Amino acid sequence: MHFDIPSDYESGTRVLDEIIRAAENSGYDADSVFAVKLALDEAIINAIKHGNKLDPSKRVRIDARVTPTRVEIEIEDQGCGFDRKKIPDPRKAPNVEKSSGRGILLIESYMNRVQWKHGGRCLRMVKLRNGRGKVK
Amino acid sequence: MQKDRLMSETPPRLTISQEKDVRVVQFTESRILDDASIAEIGAALAGMIEAKDRPKLVLDFTGVEHLSSAALGMLINVNTKVKQQSGQLRLAGIRPQILEVFVITRLNKLFRIVPTRAEALASFS
């Protein structure tokens, strides 16, 4: 599945629903679907809000492949990117009481493999069917 | 009179009731994801908290199937406001999948989470 959407939440929700429907139709269990939905929602919001900063002239590219064994998703925005290493751990004081900064932690916790590419503008993530742990 | 006042303050995404001195708020949508919903809910809860000294508040998540990190941020702001007012906050009815989100982010240590609304009501001092 290939999507090229403007930087608005409505378009993002349509993509989210379509990919989740494909995972459900492929027989992924409720926990796997929950994981993909949560990670994909965070990733799309990051791309639209933090990457493209809601700029209507910028686009978000999303490619997804749902196979019997894995869900692979790549999301790329047209923003400035970011350095993953500079994002603080929201689980550590004093960050735990901050109201933002948990999206990346959730993506990396719920997916089996996560790669940040192109200076942080592109995210590739994989969820294995019934998968636990990280894979290459 | 009390009922009318409560109804007039209730935004469409929440059901609000009063149990003695405890305000109980139930989310009516299964997904708490988008910025507009979160901002609306946050503003409604902030108004409720600021209207009362030492507020006692239960947020009932029964029926909530998904929430985003932005919703977690809104809950943190609610918790901060409750503390500023020397109040008490309980989260109840959180299904296991959502509870795992609180555990992963370690927000289960920040909030007082109880299994049911009844247990939340019984827990206030």
Image (spheres, coloured by chain):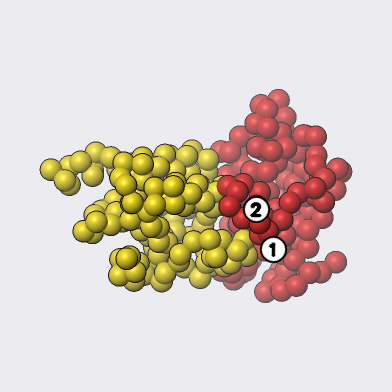
Chain colours: A red, B yellow
The residue tagged with tag 2: helix, strand or loop? Answer: loop
Residue B108 falls in image quadrant? bottom right
The three-letter code of the residue at mark 2 reads Pro
Q: Which of A13 and B72 is in front in this view?
A: B72
Q: Earlier in the sequence, mark 1 or mark 2?
A: 2
What residue is at 32 percent from the left and 47 percent from the top? B53
Q: Nearer the viewer, residue A33 or A38?
A: A38
Locate the C terminus of chain A and report the quarter of the image it occupies.
bottom right
Which label sits on residue B92? none
Q: Residues within 10 Å of mark 1 (few under 14, many from 20)?
A: some
- Parent chain of label 2: A
The three-letter code of the residue at mark 1 reads Ser
Measured in 3D between alpha carbons, the distance from the residue under mark 1 to the one under mark 2, in whole angstroms, is 21 Å
- On the rendered structure, is B68 left or right of B50? right
Which label sits on residue A109? 1
Circles 1 and 2 on the same chain: yes
What residue is at 48 percent from the left and 44 percent from the top? B38
What residue is at 40 percent from the left and 58 percent from the top? B89
- Percent position (x, y) of residue B68? 56, 52
Residue for badge 2: A94
Q: Which of A62 and B35 is in front in this view?
A: B35
* Residue that protrudes farthest toward the top in the picture: A57
- Percent position (x, y) of residue B36? 48, 38
* Callout in the foreground (1, 2): 2
